[in-house]
Amino acid sequence: MPTLDLNKTSGSGVTLEQGLNAVGAEEQLEREDTAAVGAGLDALETHVVTRRPAWKRFLSGFYPPLIALLAFLGLWELAYVRKWEPEFALPSPASVWTTFASMVSDGSAGSVIWTSVSRGLIGFAASIVLGTAIGLTLFRFRWLRSSVGPLLSGLQSLPSVAWVPMAVLWFGLGSGSIYAVVLLGAVPSIANGLLSGMDQVPPLLSRVGKVLGLGQLGLMKDVLIPASLPGYLAGLRQGWAFSWRSLMAAELIVTSSKLGLGLGGLMNQGRDLSDPPTMYTALILIFLVGIGIELIFFRPVERVILSARGLTPAAR
C-alpha cells in the first residue's frame, strides 16, 4: 500500500506538510475571528450598570436647582431694591418668606395644601378610570374613534378655565363644579395618551397573543396595556398637570365657605385683602406641590417602567 510522503515537494516548492500547516493556521484564524465576533455581540447584549453612591446622586440632583433658585432670588431682590415694580405688585423676598414661614409654622399651609391635594387626587383617580375606559373603547371600535377622536383632541386643547362658568351653571357653587372641571381637564389627555401608547405597540405582539389563544379582553390586559405603559404614563403625567391647573382655576373662581380654603382660594383671599405676600405664598405652595407629585410619584414610576424595558439605566 503506497504511503503519503509529507516531505514531498509540489511544483511550487512547498511540501505537503507545510501546506497542511498553512490550512490549519487559516482555520485557526477563522475560529478566532468567529469567537471575537461572538464576544463582541455578547458585550453588546450585556447591560452593565454602575450604581453611584446615594449621596453622589443626591448632590448631583440637588446643586443645579439650588443654584437656579439662588439666582432667581437674587434677581428678585434686585428688582425689589431697584423698584422695577411697585411694592404692592412686587413685594420683597423677605416679606414673602415671613408669610410663608408663618403659615408653615402654624399649620395653615398644611391644611390649605391638603384641601387642594385631596380634591386633586380624588378628581385625578376618577379621571384615570374614565379616561382609561374611553381610551380602550376608542381603540377597540375604530369607527367610534374616527368620529369621537377629533372631539377628544379638541377638548384636550380647550383651556380648563373656560369650563368653570359652565360647571357653575350645571352644578352650582359646590364641589361638583370643581370635580367637573378637573375631569374635563384630565380625561382627554389620559385617553389620548393611552391611545397613542397602544398605537405604537408592534402588531407582532398582537398576533402572538392571538396565536396563544387570548381573546379581546386577554389581549388588552396581558399584551396591549403592558406594552403601551410608556405612552400611557405620559398621558397620566399630562392628565395630572391639566387636572391640577383645572383645580386651581376652579378654586380661584368657585368660592364658598362650604368648600373650605384651598390653594386657589388662598390666592383669591390675598387678592381680596390686597396682601401680595399671601398671593406669592400661595403661588409658591402650588409650585411646590406640582414638583412634589412629579418627584414622589411620576419620576420613580417612569424610571421603573423604562428600566424594565432596558431604555434607561436601573440606577441614575
Image: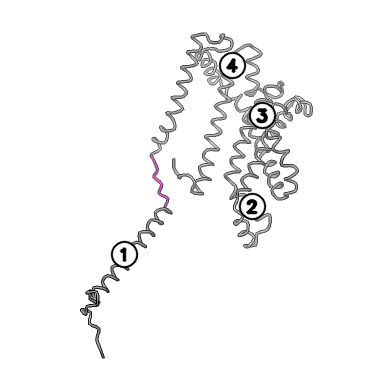
Asked if the residue under mark 4 is in contact with the one under mark 2, i.e. CB atoms within 8 Å, the reply is no
Q: Position of residue 293 (x, y in %)?
A: 56, 33
Give the residue pinned by disc 2.
Answer: 221
Question: For the view shown, which residue lies furthest in the right direction?
Answer: 170
Look at label 2 and name its amino acid: Lys
Instruction: Kindly report the distance in space between the C-alpha atoms of the residues bearing marks 4 and 1.
Output: 78 Å
Q: Residues within 10 Å of mark 3 (few under 14, many from 20)?
A: many
Q: Residue at x 54, y 17 (%)?
A: 102
Camera-side mark, 2 or 1: 1
Mark 2 or mark 3: name the one nearer the start of the chain: 2
Amino acid beneath label 1: Leu
Secondary structure under tag 3 reads helix
Which type of secondary structure does the marked residue at label 4 adopt? Answer: helix
Q: Position of residue 268 (x, y in %)?
A: 65, 18
Look at 53% across and 15% down and name the residue there.
Answer: 96
Main secondary structure along the magenta-highlighted residues: loop
Q: Give how far across and how far down residue 55 sits, in percent.
A: 39, 35
Q: Which residue was labeled with disc 1?
A: 29
Residue 255 vertical position relative to residue 185 in the rendered view, above or below: above
Q: Residue at x 62, y 39 (%)?
A: 235
Q: Which residue is mark 3?
A: 246
Q: Nearer the viewer, mark 2 or mark 4?
A: 2
Q: Residue farthest to the bottom?
A: 1
Residue drawn at point x = 39 percent, y = 54 percent: 43
Using the image, determine if residue 54 lies above or below residue 14: above
Q: Is residue 6 left or right of residue 164?
A: left
Q: Quadrant of the C terminus?
A: top left
According to the picture, the residue beneath numbered tag 4 turns out to be 278
- Sequence-wise, which precedes: disc 4 or disc 1? 1
Report helix, strand or loop for mark 2.
helix
In terms of image quadrants, where is residue 230?
top right
